[in-house]
Structure formats: C-alpha cells, structure tokens
Image: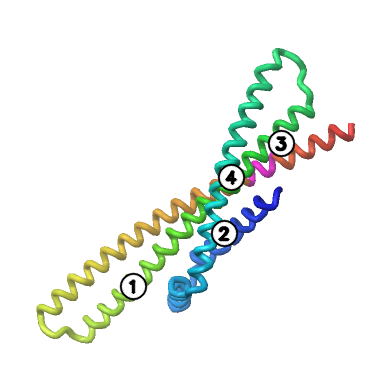
C-alpha cells in the first residue's frame, strides 16, 4: 500500500474512533462539555479546516481509484474474451485478479473514508442540536414549574414547550436516519473485509504455484 493510501487508512481509522466517541453513551453533563468544546474551540476549528483540505485530496484519490478499477475490469473482460478456448496462464490471471482487487480495495478505502466524513459531520450537528433543544426544554420546564405570571404567559410557555417537543421529535427522527447511515457504513466495512479475505486467499494460491 502506497504512502497516500496508508495515510487515508489512518484517517479512516481516526474517523471510526471519533465516530465511536460521538455515539458512546456518555453522561449528559460530560457530553454537553465535550460538544461545547468541539463547537467553540479555535484549535478544533483549525484542525477541521485542515481535514477539509485533506478530504479534497481523498476525493481526488477516490476518482483516480475508480478510474483504475474501471480500466482493470475492462482489461480483465477483454482478456477473457480473447482466449478463444486457449488455456490461460495462471500467473497472468493471478496478476489481473490482484490488480483488480487492489483497485477495488482503493475504491472502498477512499469511498468509505469520504462517506464516513459526511456521517460524522451530520451526526455531530444532530447531537449538538439535540443538546441545545434539551437545554431550552429544561429551562422552560423549570420556569413553568416555578409558577407562571399570568394565564397569557402560561399559554405562551406551553406553546413554546410544544414547539420544542416537536423539535425534539424531529431530532429523534434524524437520529433514526443516522442509524440507517450507520447500518450502511457497517455493510461497506463488511464488504471491505470480504475483499481483504479474497486477497489473502489469492495470495496464498499464488505462493503455492510458485513453490510447485
């Protein structure tokens, strides 16, 4: 694996770790301090700016890997169609299969890295909005329990609480959408593991042929 794909893999691993931290069942007070720090810290803002630039390069790598995968697939199909009943060379077939696997691996690696960056961004803002909504709801609930100054103010607070409840329901709906994205991410990761297993099997067969 070349240096830029190794860096992409490290970026993907850091995204997975960050994702686990974001969705971890932390106490509300700790989660509130964590997200306040992430949203207000200037250092985090500078790091996020640098990551945006790095994701541009990852997108370029994704386009290049996708082009390579299409080219290798076309070469593989052309080689199969030009055999015309001739016995194929196992080394040639193994080389083409290995190139095809590497191209597919790079597509999955870069594509999953970009996909997870979108999931992380969306998840962060969903949880941040949910925390802000819970804070406002708690303040209004405390104000309503301490006693309202007049029927008009009580109705206004009730309407605002109802509005916040609707926002909370929308946030929960967004959380369900996020669970769907999480399931898709797991499916992509399982497909990547399957391709890695196929490469290991293919490499083992190639080494056995060389020994013979």
Residue at x 49%, y 66% (from the top left corner): 22
Q: Residues within 10 Å of mark 4 (few under 14, many from 20)?
A: many
Q: Is residue 87 left or right of residue 102?
A: right
State the image quarter where residue 71 is shown.
top right
The dot on residue 16 is 2
> Is any part of residue 193 visible from this angle?
yes
Residue 108: numbered disc: 4
Image location (x, y in percent) of residue 189? 58, 49
Q: CA distance from mark 4 to mark 1?
A: 38 Å
Of the two numbered discs 4 and 1 on the same chain, state the one appearing first in sequence: 4
- Label 1: how many residues lie within 10 Å, few (<14), some (14-19) or many (20+)? some
Residue sitting farthest toward the top? 84
Comparing labels 4 and 1, the label whose residue is closer to the camera: 4
Picture coordinates of residue 212 (x, y %)?
A: 89, 31
- Give the main secondary structure, helix, strand or loop, of the magenta stretch: helix
Magenta range = 193-198
Q: CA distance from mark 3 to mark 4?
A: 15 Å
Secondary structure beneath dot 4 equals helix
Looking at the image, can residue 27 be seen? no
Task: Please name the residue that numbered disc 3 is placed on.
Answer: 98
Using the image, determine if residue 37 lies above or below residue 91.
below
Query: In terms of sequence position, does the residue under pointer 2 or pointer 3 come before the other?
Result: 2
How many angstroms separate mark 2 from mark 4 (CA)? 15 Å
Q: Is residue 39 left or right of residue 20?
A: left
Can you say whether 120 is above or below 80 in the image? below
Which residue bears the numbered disc 1? 134
Is tag 1's residue or tag 2's residue first in the polypeptide sequence?
A: 2
Q: Are marks 4 and 1 in contact (CB under 8 Å)?
A: no
Question: Element under label 3?
Answer: helix
Q: Residues within 10 Å of mark 3 (few under 14, many from 20)?
A: some
Magenta stretch contains residue 196 = yes
């Amino acid at each position: 694996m070349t240096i830029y794909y190794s860096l992409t893999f490290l970026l993907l691993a850091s995204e997975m770790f960050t994702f686990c931290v974001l969705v971890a069942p932390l106490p509300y007070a700790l989660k509130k301090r964590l997200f306040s720090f992430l949203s207000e810290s200037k250092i985090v803002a500078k790091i996020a700016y640098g990551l945006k630039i790095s994701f541009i390069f990852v997108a370029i790598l994704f386009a290049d890997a996708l082009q390579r995968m299409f080219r290798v697939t076309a070469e593989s199909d052309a080689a199969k169609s030009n055999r015309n009943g001739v016995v194929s060379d196992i080394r040639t077939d193994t080389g083409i299969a290995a190139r095809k696997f590497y191209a597919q691996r790079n597509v999955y690696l870069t594509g999953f890295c970009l996909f997870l960056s979108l999931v992380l961004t969306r998840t962060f803002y969903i949880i941040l909005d949910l925390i802000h909504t819970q804070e406002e709801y708690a303040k209004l609930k405390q104000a309503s329990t301490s006693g309202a100054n007049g029927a008009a103010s009580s109705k206004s607070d009730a309407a605002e609480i109802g509005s916040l409840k609707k926002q909370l329901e929308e946030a929960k709906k967004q959380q369900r959408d996020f669970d769907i994205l999480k399931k898709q991410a797991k499916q992509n990761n399982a497909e990547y593991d399957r391709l890695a297993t196929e490469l290991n099997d293919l490499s083992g067969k190639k080494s056995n042929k060389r020994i013979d």
